[in-house]
Image (spheres, rainbow, N blue to C red):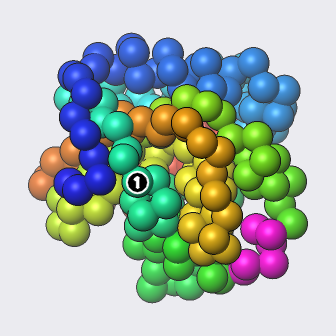
């Protein structure tokens, strides 16, 4: 995996704790959890990680991404209805951020969260990914907006702020789990009735 520098092994609790630090205090993410029927961020994201993707059972490694402008546009967009609903049927769960940007570039040029990230990108951030066994591609499970902001920077020749560090918590999908992303997309993140 070029562009990646192995840093250390991780436990799921460490990965989830960083995810919690990234999102749980943000009012927008708290509101999203409630819109999905959950009482709070913790319940919402635990459902996704435990039930939909079995993330706590995986072996995790942390990598530094040496050239995010080259790497992140090639990550696959994760199995989330809000992201996959506008993708052509033959590209669902198979579309990279670079390809996704081209579907509706105007949307991403005016998207408030992406605009904010381009001007105030976090100095240090962690993205969560899974490696698909059949293609060896990385699927972005957490960090989609940051990945899209980096993709837009790449496409438009925008320089990211100096000194940013993007790390990747990464695990593998087993050969027997080839339909995992489809199951996760079907299951969704709304609280079951």
Q: Which secondary structure lies at badge 1?
A: loop
The foreground one among 100 and 167 is 167
Q: Quadrant of residue 40?
A: top right
Query: Which segment did they paint magenta?
Result: 104-109
Residue at the spot x=40%, y=59% of the render? Answer: 71
> With 55 as the anchor, is 49 left or right in this view?
right
Q: Which residue is mark 1?
A: 67
The foreground one among 79 and 168 is 168
The foreground one among 41 and 37 is 41
Q: Is residue 71 visible?
A: yes
Q: Is residue 185 visible?
A: no
**Residue 144 sits inside the magenta stretch:** no
Q: Residues within 10 Å of mark 1 (few under 14, many from 20)?
A: few
Q: Quadrant of residue 75?
A: bottom left
Residue at the spot x=37%, y=45% of the render? Answer: 65
Residue at the spot x=76%, y=68% of the render? Answer: 108
Which image quadrant: the C terminus? top right
Give residue 149's position: percent from left, percent from top: 65, 56
Residue at the spot x=69%, y=21% of the render? Answer: 24
> With 129 as the anchor, is 101 left or right in this view?
right
Which image quadrant: the N terminus? bottom left
Q: Quadrant of residue 81?
A: bottom right
Give residue 6's position: percent from left, percent from top: 22, 34
**Residue 107 sits inside the magenta stretch:** yes
> With 35 as the anchor, is 14 left or right in this view?
left
Q: Mostly what secondary structure, the magenta segment?
A: helix
> With 80 as the anchor, is 66 left or right in this view?
left
Give residue 164's position: percent from left, percent from top: 55, 37
Vertical comparison of 69 with 11: above or below: below
Which residue ends up furthest to the left in the rendered image?
175
């Amino acid at each position: 995996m070029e562009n990646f520098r192995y840093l250390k092994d991780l436990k799921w609790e460490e990965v989830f704790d960083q995810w919690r630090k990234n999102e749980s205090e943000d009012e927008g993410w708290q509101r999203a959890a409630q819109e999905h029927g959950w009482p709070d961020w913790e319940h919402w994201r635990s459902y996704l990680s435990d039930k939909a993707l079995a993330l706590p059972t995986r072996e995790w490694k942390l990598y530094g991404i040496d050239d995010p402008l080259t790497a992140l546009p090639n990550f696959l967009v994760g199995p989330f209805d809000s992201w996959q609903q506008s993708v052509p049927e033959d590209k669902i769960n198979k579309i990279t951020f670079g390809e996704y940007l081209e579907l509706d570039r105007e949307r991403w040029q005016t998207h408030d969260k992406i605009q904010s990230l381009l001007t105030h990108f976090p100095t240090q951030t962690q993205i969560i990914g899974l490696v698909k066994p059949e293609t060896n591609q990385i699927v972005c499970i957490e960090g989609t907006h940051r990945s899209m902001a980096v993709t837009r920077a790449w496409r438009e020749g925008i320089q990211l702020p100096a000194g940013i560090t993007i790390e990747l918590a990464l695990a593998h999908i087993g050969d027997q789990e080839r339909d995992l992303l489809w199951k996760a997309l079907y299951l969704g993140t709304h609280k079951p009735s």
